[in-house]
Image (cartoon, rainbow, N blue to C red):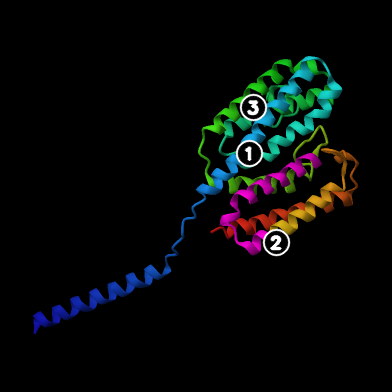
């Protein structure tokens, strides 16, 4: 009798343990890993020609600075900075390179930052290109180095999406609100470039996208691009942001936030 009793207790214990394990297993959510390898490769193929153009235009900017052509350099600067915005989906992948090229300047130490923001300070505040001759030369070297490194780097598809989300949030909450200083008042250029960055990502990730959410994002993106187009005064030339009324600024912020939210939904349902 004792042996049977012990066996019965052991069986019950085993059964309860198995049931508990089964319940615990049910509570564990299985997350399917999404293969974004092809999307990342497609995105890389799309942005490599852009990086080549970045080198060419930043070299032209350096030439204007060397020749003391402040007016020409001032007109070109926002167009050169648009490359940085278009490429921000790569920011975490090339953090060191981006810091050299686009590190924000501290008040009173603008020239120490180097890169594009030191040049922005020289052109728009000091109106003197001679104080950034070496900085402009170094900038060309840094952009060239970024291009070379990108050519041999395998990109992380998930990281591209995360950086694009962060880019959109920063534009909506910092660039357009004045949280981030913009001496050139070229915020509209940056907005346009950010929207173009989203277009590039969407093209590369189309095979992984939920088609309904992709369409919703396309529609919102088109509305925001239309909003920006209203302020275009020439080919790749936009109204100075300091001329915007409070309502115009808020309308652009609202449109951009809607795009950012649509992109968040788009990313959350990748497959």
Q: Position of residue 200 (x, y in %)?
A: 66, 46
Mark 1 touching mark 2, by CB under 8 A? Answer: no
* Residue positioned 37% across, 68% down in the render: 25
Q: Tag 2 or tag 1, which sits nearer the N-term? A: 1
Q: Is residue 205 visible?
A: yes
Query: Closest to the observer: 182 or 179?
Result: 182
> What residue sits right under mark 1 in the picture?
47
Q: Please tell me whether mark 3 sits on a helix, a strand or a loop.
A: helix
**Which region of the structure is painted magenta?**
188-215
Residue sitting nearer the eye, 87 or 174: 87
8 magenta-colored: no
Residue located beneath label 3 in the image: 143
Q: Using a 10 Å C-alpha cutoff, classify the residue at mark 3 as few (fewer than 14 neighbours), some (14 to 19) or many (20 or more).
A: many
> Residue 198, relative to residue 152: is it above or below?
below
Question: Element under label 2?
Answer: helix
Question: Which numbered circle lies on residue 216?
Answer: 2
Tell me how far mark 1 sits from mark 2, CA to CA.
Answer: 24 Å
């Amino acid at each position: 009798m004792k042996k049977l009793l012990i066996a019965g207790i052991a069986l019950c214990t085993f059964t309860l343990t198995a049931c508990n394990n089964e319940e615990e297993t049910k509570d564990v959510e299985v997350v399917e890993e999404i293969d974004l390898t092809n999307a990342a490769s497609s995105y890389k193929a799309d942005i490599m020609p852009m990086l080549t153009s970045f080198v060419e235009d930043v070299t032209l900017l350096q030439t204007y600075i060397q020749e003391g052509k402040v007016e020409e350099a001032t007109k070109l600067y926002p167009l050169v900075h648009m490359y940085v915005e278009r490429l921000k989906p790569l920011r975490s992948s090339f953090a060191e390179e981006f810091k050299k090229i686009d590190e924000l300047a501290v008040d009173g130490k603008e020239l120490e930052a180097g890169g594009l923001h030191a040049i922005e300070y020289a052109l728009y505040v000091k109106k003197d290109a001679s104080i950034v001759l070496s900085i402009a030369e170094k900038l060309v070297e840094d952009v060239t180095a970024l291009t070379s490194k990108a050519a041999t780097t395998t990109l992380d598809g998930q990281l591209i999406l995360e950086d694009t989300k962060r880019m959109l949030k920063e534009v909506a909450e910092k660039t357009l609100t004045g949280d981030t200083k913009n001496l050139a008042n070229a915020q509209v250029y940056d907005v346009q470039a950010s929207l173009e960055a989203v277009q590039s990502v969407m093209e590369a990730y189309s095979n992984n996208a939920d088609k309904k959410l992709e369409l919703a994002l396309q529609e919102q993106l088109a509305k925001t691009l239309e909003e920006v187009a209203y302020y275009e005064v020439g080919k790749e030339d936009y109204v100075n942001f300091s001329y915007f009324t409070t309502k115009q600024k808020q309308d652009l912020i609202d449109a951009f936030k809607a795009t950012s939210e649509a992109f968040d939904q788009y990313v959350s349902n990748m497959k």
